[in-house]
Image (cartoon, rainbow, N blue to C red):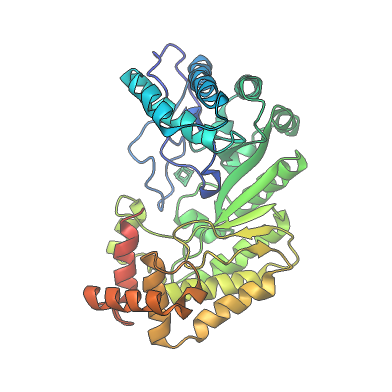
Amino acid sequence: MASSNDKQPYRGFEQGPIRPPSEARSLLVRITRNCHWNRCSFCPVYKGQHFSIRPTEHVVQDLNTIAAHVEKLAMLSAGSGMLLEEDVKNAYAALDSENTVSFRAALSWFLSGMESVFLQDADCLVLKPSRLIVILNHLQTLFPTIKRITCYSRSDTINRILLEDLVKLRLAGLNRIHIGMESGSDIILSQVCKGVSKDAHIRAGRTVKEAGIELSEYYMPGLGGKDNYRENAIETADAMRRINPHFIRLRTLAIPSRAPLAEELRAGRFNKCPDALVVEEILLFLHSLGPVTSYLASDHVLNLFPELEGELPRDKERMIGLLDGFLAMNREKRFLYQLGRRLGIFTRISDMDNPARMAEVREAAALRGATPDNIDEITDAIIQRFI
Ligand code: SF4
């Protein structure tokens, strides 16, 4: 499983390719490279890339580099109390080329308030807890402003960690873990090669909570396709109900051409749900959730409704009303919303009340030849551009 080559030379400051949408303001700290599982059929992110653990001293070196940039930025802003663009440009121009990426990372974090950190890549809990604690301690020492440190992990990895070690990680500052549950259905989990069962997801989720760490679980509507959309809704709702995570995050299925699932789709072995069926699935999910007290977040660009957010159970009826409202639209109106949302012209259903935006969407529909009959193909093509 996890392996590291501590003799590898330092390749300079590194950051991995992805982070959760909620970590947009976080400093990204690369502890491992790529994904040690790397078999999920819907996921193209690390395919063809080898997994490795970065030597601890390399991560420490990255952090020291960021600290040096932050110190410089603090000095530049000390006089006027603000960072002047010209000072930043001059500081950037004076850098060696190997320091520009780290400077940009430090600048963006500095401007965001330096309160949160995301540890990369796909599952840094494969590290020995003692090793991760060294990094967490170094982070806290260098940057006392930090309030939140988070990472992605896999349920099977968490199930191999002792509860007392998770508690130690929490005490060292790791206070939120993002898990890609994707589905609570054993049938679907097996079909997409997730390598984790529903039961393993439930055990891992409960353990994270027991350790006092905030838990963010991702649900992927659409992952069961047309054949299993009801199964996906009902089984995922059941798993979420039994975990009751702090956050449930929606991340609707999209199939990039680089993902193995794209081949299943081309071969006709996977029947992708059109948007309306995904909405029905989410509706069934909400109806099946039971009394969870999670915050439901829809912060991924692939989701059709960014406003499908709120505290459960308090906001559940509003969210159900939103989805029912979409399904009750006539075909023409529904198709205009789908297109407008995918083009970024609408960010919520009420944007359809804005005549200028509606005119823009109608114009885009005419330009693209989009109609209620071909809207799912058109929006799939649009989505391919940002996945
Ligand atoms: S575990 Fe996560 S990163 Fe790894 S292949 Fe699966 S979805 Fe992708």
| Front position in the image: 169 or 386 | 386
Left or right: where does residue 262 sit relative to residue 350? Answer: left
Residue 293 visible in rendering: yes
Residue extending furthest toward the front: 80
Pinpoint residue 218: horizontal percent, then vertical percent.
56, 53
Left or right: where does residue 364 sit relative to residue 125? Answer: left
Question: What is the tally of numbered marks visible in this picture?
Answer: 0
Residue at figure coordinates x 67%, y 26% from the top left: 144
- Above or below: residue 53 compared with residue 157: above
Pinpoint residue 74: horizontal percent, then vertical percent.
55, 24
Residue at figure coordinates x 73%, y 44% from the top left: 209
Residue extending furthest toward the bottom: 330
Pinpoint residue 117: horizontal percent, then vertical percent.
58, 34
| Front position in the image: 30 or 291 | 30
Residue at figure coordinates x 38%, y 79% from the top left: 335
| Front position in the image: 265 or 152 | 152
Residue 120 visible in rendering: no
Left or right: where does residue 177 sit relative to residue 121? Answer: right
Pinpoint residue 380: horizontal percent, then vertical percent.
33, 65
Residue extending furthest toward the top: 7
Residue at figure coordinates x 49%, y 49% from the top left: 194
- Above or below: residue 231 compared with residue 175: below
